[in-house]
Image (spheres, coloured by chain):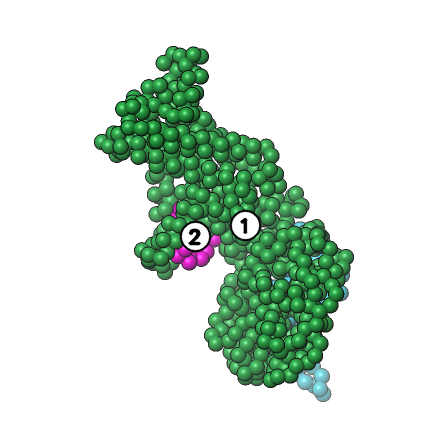
Chain colours: A green, B cyan
Amino acid sequence: MIGMAFVLTYCVFALGRIFFQLPGADRKRFLVSLVTPKTMLKNVRDIFCDCLLHVKIWKRNKLLGYMHSSIAFGWFMLIVVGHIEVLLYTPHRVKLFYYPIFFRYFVAEDEHTMKGEVLFFLMDFFLLVVLSGIALAMIKRLRSRLFGMRRTTRPSLLDMVGLYSLWAIFPLRLLAESFTANISGGSFLTRSINHLLTPLLGDQASVLPWWWAYSCALGIFFVVLPFTRYMHIPSEILLIPLRNAGIKIRNARKGLAKTQVYSCPGCGLCIDACPMSVQKANTRDTTVYLNRQIRRGNEKRIEEISDKCLLCGKCTAVCPVGVEGDRLRIAQRSVRRYGINPDYTSIDTSPLTVDSRGKVLYYAGCMTALTPSIKKAMESLLRKAGIDYELMDKDGGICCGRPMWMAGRIDQARQMMKKNTEIILSSGADTLLLTCPICYRIFKEKYRLDGIRIVHHTEFIEGLVSSGRLALGAEDRTFVYHDPCELGRGCGIYEQPRNVLRKVGSLVEAEKNRRESICCGGSVGSLTLGFDKRRVITQNALDNLTVASPDVIVTACPLCLDTFRRYADRKVEDIAETVDRNTRTQTRTS
Amino acid sequence: MDNIFGFKLSPSSTIDMDKVDFTLFDKLHELEPDAWKCMACGSCSATCPAGTFSGMSLRKVLHCLQRGKQKEAVNMLRCCMLCGKCSIVCPRGINTRHLILSICKLYKED
C-alpha cells in the first residue's frame, strides 16, 4: 500500500519535472506527437514490444529475452487478470487498487461459485511464467555466460535490496496463495502446493504470516524502486514517446538526458559491447556505470567516464531501451568551462575558395591529409571515371568540426562549420565528396548545405561502378571490410562498400560486423585514452577482423587505416586503394 | 628611434626566469605528466592545419609556457581546431588533445 502510493507520487513528480525541463519548442513537439495518431500508435506498439515483450533482447539472446519478458509480461498479465477477477466478482471494490493484489486473501470462494477455472488457471500459469523468469535471473547472477553475456553489472547496495525483494515477491505470493487455495480457490499450481502443505502446516494461523511476508516484499520493492535501477520500469514508458517525438538531448542532466539515465535498466549489455572492456580496468567506464554515477551526482567519476569514451556508439546500438551513451557523454563534456576559448572568426575564407561550379568538390579533411595514399587513389579514380573535380583543402583547410564537437566544445565547432559552409556554398559545387567518415558524419548531420549532395567515397564509388563509369577487374584475394564507427553506426552505410568489394575479390565477414563492428581504437572521441592504452583495443579489433583469415583488411576511414596499419599482420588499405588497383580500363564518358 | 639607417631597436627579449610565476606550469605537468615527454621535434607543428592560418604550433606553445611567455601561448591556442592530427604523428605518443584541453582549462585569456 505504502509502497504503491509512494511510487506513484514520485513518478508523477518526476514526470512533471522532466516535462518542464524540456525546452519550450521540444515540449510543444512532444505534446503534438502525443496526439498525432501515427506516433500514438507507434508509442503503444513500442511500449508493448520493448517494455513488456523485450523484443530487442529476444533478438540478441533467446534465453535472456525469455528471462526478461517472462518477468515483465508475466507480471503485467498477473495484474491484468487479477483486475479482471475483481471486476467480475466484486465490481464494487475495483476502486481500491490494492484489492486485486490481495484478492485471494479477501475473497473466500472457489471455482464452483466462480463460474469456471479459466481465470484461476491463467493466474497460476502466469505466476509460473514469472517464477521461471526469476529462476533464470538467479542462474544468470551466477553464470551469465549461459545468457550470452561475458560480464554483467555489479549491482549497488540499493539495487541488491530491490533485486532480492523482487525475487522474493513471487515465491511468497505463490506460498501465500497456496495457503489460501483451499478457501479462495486456485489452480494446478497453488492447489497442489496446498495439498502438500496442509498435512505439514495444517494450522490456519500460518496463513497470515505468508500474506504479510508477501505484502512486505512488495512494499519494500516499491519503496526502493525510485532509487534503484528498477526505476527504468516507469521511465522507459516516458522515454519511448519522447524518442518517437524526435526530441534530442539538449541539456547534460535535464529533460531527455535525465529520462535516458533513469531508463537504464542496468542490464550490462553495454559492458560486453564496449571496445574498452578488453581491459578489465575499463569495464567500470561503460555506459551503465555512467548512468549510475549521473544518478548519484558523482561529478569526478562522471568526468572520468565521459572523457575516456571512444564515442564509437556501440553501446547505443546494443542498448535495449535506447540510452544514447555517446550523445550523453558529449553532453556531459559540453558543460565544462575553459579559460581559453578558440575563435576562428579571423580566418579569411576567400583564398580557400576554389571555383568549382557544377563540379565535384573533394574535401579530404585532416585525417586524409595524413594518409595521402587515400587521396591519391581517390583522385586517380576520379580521373579514370572522367569526373571534373576540385580539391577543397589542397594546401590545408579548416577542420570539419567533428573532433571539436566530440570534445563537447559545440560553439567552437559551430564557428568552424560556419567557415566551411561559406567556402562550400561560394564555390558553387553541386557535390561534396568526403573520404573521411568523421567529416562525413558532421556534414550529414549538422551542416546546412541545401542543394549540395554530400557523399562519402564508398557511396560515390559504388555509384560510379554501378553506372559503368568504372570498370572493375577481380583479383584473387579475400577481403574483410571493417565498418568504421562513424560511417556504419553513425551514418548507416554498410552495404555500399561491400557491394563494391564483392566485385573485386571475395569478401569474408568479421566475427562482429556492421552495427556490432568493433572500434579500431584510434578514435578522436576519447580525450583521455593515451596512445599506449589504445593498443589492446586495436589488437582486439584486429583479432575480430581476421577470424576468417582474409588477405587484406579494407576500411573506409583514414583514421582506422592509420591505426590498424601500426599493428596489423597483413595488408590494410582503404577501399579507394583497392578499387583503384583493380580498375582496368579507363572509360571516359563525360 | 625608429628606422635609423634601415635598422631599428627592438625591445629586449630577455626573460627573467626569477620573475616568472610557474605555479600553473607545474600544475599542468602534474595533470599531464606526458608533457615532459615532448622532445620538441615539431611533428605536431608540421601537420597542424591551424598553423597555416595563425602560426599555431604546439611545440612553440610548450616552449612559451616553459619560458613564462603565457600570452603568446594563449594566442596560439586560440586557433587550435582540436582535429587530433598532432596526436597521430607524435613520435612520443603524447595525448596532445588532452594536453591542449588541459592548458585551455588552466590558463586564461588576458
Residue at left offset 33%, top offset 56%: A37
* SS of the residue under disc 2: helix
Residue A414 shows up from this direction: no
Q: Answer with mark 1 or mark 2, whichever residue precedes in sequence.
A: 2
Residue projecting furthest to the left:
A92
Q: What chain is tagged by disc 1?
A: A
Nearer-the-camera pick, A549 or A112:
A112
* SS of the residue under disc 1: helix
Nearer-the-camera pick, B46 or A430:
A430
Residue that badge 1 annotates: A318
Left or right of B106, for residue A40:
left
**Highlighted range, magenta:** A237-256
Residue at left offset 60%, top offset 49%: A274
Asked if the residue at tag 2 contacts the one at tag 1, i.e. Cβ–Cβ closer than 8 Å, the answer is: no
Q: Is residue A122 above or below residue A243?
A: above
Q: Amino acid at mark 2?
A: Leu
The numbered mark at residue A256 is: 2
Q: What chain is tagged by disc 2?
A: A
Dot 2 crowding, Cα within 10 Å, few <14, some 14–19, many 20+: many
In the image, residue B86 lies in the stretch drawn in magenta: no
- Image location of residue A84, percent across then percent down: 30, 34
Image quarter in which the C terminus of chain B is found: bottom right
Nearer-the-camera pick, B34 or A255:
A255
